Image (spheres, rainbow, N blue to C red):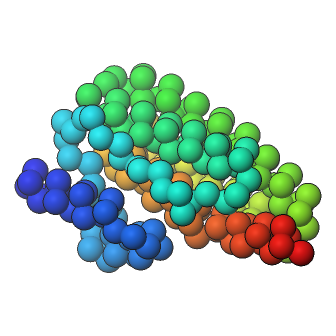
Amino acid sequence: MASEEKRRFFKFFLSRGDPHKQIKEMKEVRGGRSQLIPKGRSGMDFIIWRPSYNLGDPKIDNQHRQLVDLVNCLCAEICRSSSKNIVEKILVQLVHYAEEHFRDEEELMAHIGYPELQEHTEEHVRLVEEVFEFKKKYDDGLVSKEDLVNFLKIWLIDHIIGSDLKIKHWLERKKAA
């Protein structure tokens, strides 16, 4: 894909309104695989936080933003062609923070009596396993840095808008009751 085409696609993706539709369209356009990182890109966040991603719980919302920041940091390092060691350190930090966040999110769901707690907890376990599997492929040289960041973007945003926003609706109903 030519550099200009990548920029147009990247800009198009980030300007779209409905995040569910964005991911679906991105997967359709790229055959289920994102190729959004233009090499050498800098100065722009790879994931832009949108207010529509907020759940309404300040602690969880802050953690989600921190996870987005970590993925953006990883992307920036990759765009700078940083060493594998630096990428590894950020990735480890991301995984540890995600595990901490998942525990906090599970505590919140238990506290509010979220009916899909068990399924959501199982999804958290699966998500961590997926990251470790993808990291192993990266370590073994089977996937590129760009593939890694694209995977993490889909992994994170898909979980937030696909699963976590269900918690938002449950929280809103609980607050209204």
- Please provide percent x and percent y for residue 79: 27, 35
> Residue placed farthest to the front in the image?
176
| Image spot of residue 15 (x, y percent) | 31, 63
Q: What residue do we see at 61% from left, 57% from top?
A: 54
Q: How many tags in the picture?
A: 0
Q: Which of 66/149 is in front?
A: 66
Residue 174, image x, y percentages: 85, 70
Quarter of the rendering occupied by the N terminus: bottom left
Left or right: 88 in relation to 34: right
Q: Is residue 25 visible?
A: yes
In the image, taking residue 14 as reference, residue 89 lies left or right, namely right
Q: Is residue 133 above or below residue 22?
A: above
Which residue is nearer to you in this view: 23 or 126? 23
Task: Give the left or right position of residue 119, taking residue 4 as reference.
Answer: right
Quadrant of the snapshot with the C terminus: bottom right
Q: Is residue 8 left or right of residue 92?
A: left
Task: Reply above or below: 2 against 149.
Answer: below
Residue located at (34% from left, 30% from top): 77
Residue 142 appears in the picture as rendered: no
| Residue toward you, 115 or 87 | 115
Look at 36% across and 39% down and name the residue there.
Answer: 75
The quarter of the displayed image where residue 35 is located: bottom left
Q: Where is residue 138? Give x, y as percent.
A: 41, 41
Residue displayed at 50% across by 30% down: 90
Q: Quadrant of residue 41?
A: top left
Q: Relative to 76, is 37 above or below?
A: below
Q: Is the residue 60 above or below the residue 118 in the image?
A: above
